[in-house]
Amino acid sequence: MKKFFLILFILGLVNGLAAQTVQHITAQTTRMQPQTLLHRFQLKPGDSFSPAAYEKAQDDLHKLRVFKKLEFSETEHNGQIDITINAQDGYYIFPLAFFTGGSKSAAGASVVAGNLFKQAEQIFFFAGGSKDGFTTRKGISIGRHLLTMAYTQLHFDQNFYRGGWSNVYSVFSTTDDDDHRSSLLRSVRARQDKISLLYNYRFSPSGRVFISPVYNRVVYAQNQLDSGNHHALTAGLHFSNDIRPGMNMGALAGYGLTDKQKSLQDLPHARTGYSASLAYSGGGKWSDSDYAISKLAAQGTGILEFPGRHLLIAEVKAQEAFEADFTDQILSTEVLTGAGKYDRQFRGDRAAGAGISFAYYLLRNQTGLLSLAPFYEISYTRVEGSFRPHSGAGANLFYRLWRFPLPFGINYTHNLQDGSHQVGFVIGGAF
């Protein structure tokens, strides 16, 4: 019996030592109110304290990208943890202009501002155009909310080629139609006016829900194909964890680099990340569409990050068009990973794709990061009852300065269906 009580006493002592609780959290800031920062800090008074949860909460503040200094300290007394955060936040306005050449020149400009209203918010505006039309996009991200609006007007030729290929069209498409003139079957002139809204709400650290109404009117020459309204509504869910954040537009002003030294250090062990999403798009008379639209899309990505920060990335995508006319059919490129560059694509009512890439860091130092990312991707699209493959292999070579937010480099893609080669200069992308 004495041994039994001794065991209970030891177990209680161990649990008492292990069960640490957050008691107080204080913050010192430069511009924003301390309560604003504490609201974004995932740990709260009364929460259980663990090194993993503490590090995750710190990372979430780093990802706001508005701090020039971000320091954490903690004290412990009888299992109660007090956390102190010392933050130096600022604001930035970052303009950027760019130009692309080739058979179809295009130009654009963007402005991104951060923390102007002391809420760790980001505001962005983009506009660009070419001989095919123009596009604009604007939005704001603040706290759990993201709201964007986009408008595009295009004048383009919808081309049809032997083998079921159709051209890729957009403001910044650099497709050279002369390269495929011998296989051209017919061409239809078209105009598209598209307005889209997106509202995204983060209901948990890893979960988001989104809704996007789209006004889309497409008119083909002489009312061919499915001219008319293609208005639709898309809604869905997205989950992600340990996926690296995107561009840091405040870096030129020195903001958002508070975890730079940490990012240069090797990890103690490999770690994993993931993202997954499910979305449904619908349209019909209720959305003032001239055509019935019913589409389901799913996506999943898994990431393995090695101690040296190299990344192994695997991605799968699938779409089903229960009801869709020509304009709303699934494009084969929509279920590819986006690593490759192509100027032709299939249209169909069902498609699935997968891809794998490995981002290897050739260089990691105080100046920047140089990575080489070979990839392979493939999709199958059901066209008139039979599945057709669309696949490619190649590599992306990127360099990113810590103080310049946009990676730049070159992309090489070998199309495994038609044997074509694509080499392009790339600004943007992910590491």
Image: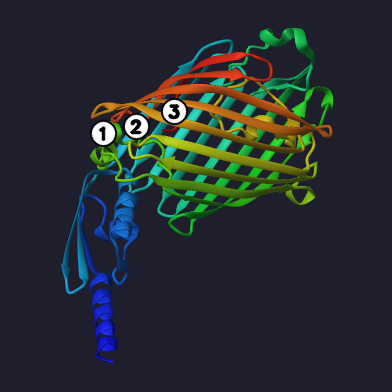
Q: Which is in the foreground here, disc 1 or disc 3? A: 3
The answer to whether 303 appears left or right of 23 in the picture is right
Q: Residue flagged by tag 1: what amino acid is it?
A: Ala
Under tag 1, what secondary structure?
helix
Q: How was the colour assigned to the protein in this rendering?
A: rainbow
How many circles with numbers are drawn on the protein? 3
Q: State the mark number for residue 428.
A: 3
Residue drawn at (62%, 16%), measured in percent from left and top? Answer: 175
Q: Point out the residue furthest to the bottom here.
A: 1
- Asked if disc 1 and disc 2 are in contact, CB closer than 8 Å, the reply is yes
Density class for disc 2 (Cα within 10 Å; few <14, some 14-19, many ≥20) is some
The residue where tag 1 is placed is 253
Q: State the mark number for residue 94.
A: 2
- Residue 84 at what x, y percent from top left? 19, 59
Residue drawn at (27%, 80%), measured in percent from left and top? Answer: 12
Density class for disc 1 (Cα within 10 Å; few <14, some 14-19, many ≥20) is some
Disc 1 or 2, which lies upstream in sequence? 2
Disc 1 or 3, which lies upstream in sequence? 1
- Comparing 309 with 230, the one in front is 309
Q: Quadrant of the C terminus?
A: top left
CA distance for labels 1 and 2:
9 Å
Q: Which is in the foreground here, disc 2 or disc 3? A: 3
CA distance for labels 2 and 3:
15 Å
- Comparing 262 with 347, the one in front is 262
Disc 2 or 3, which lies upstream in sequence? 2
Residue drawn at (27%, 36%), measured in percent from left and top? Answer: 264
- Residue 223 at what x, y percent from top left? 83, 27
Q: Residue flagged by tag 3: what amino acid is it?
A: Gly
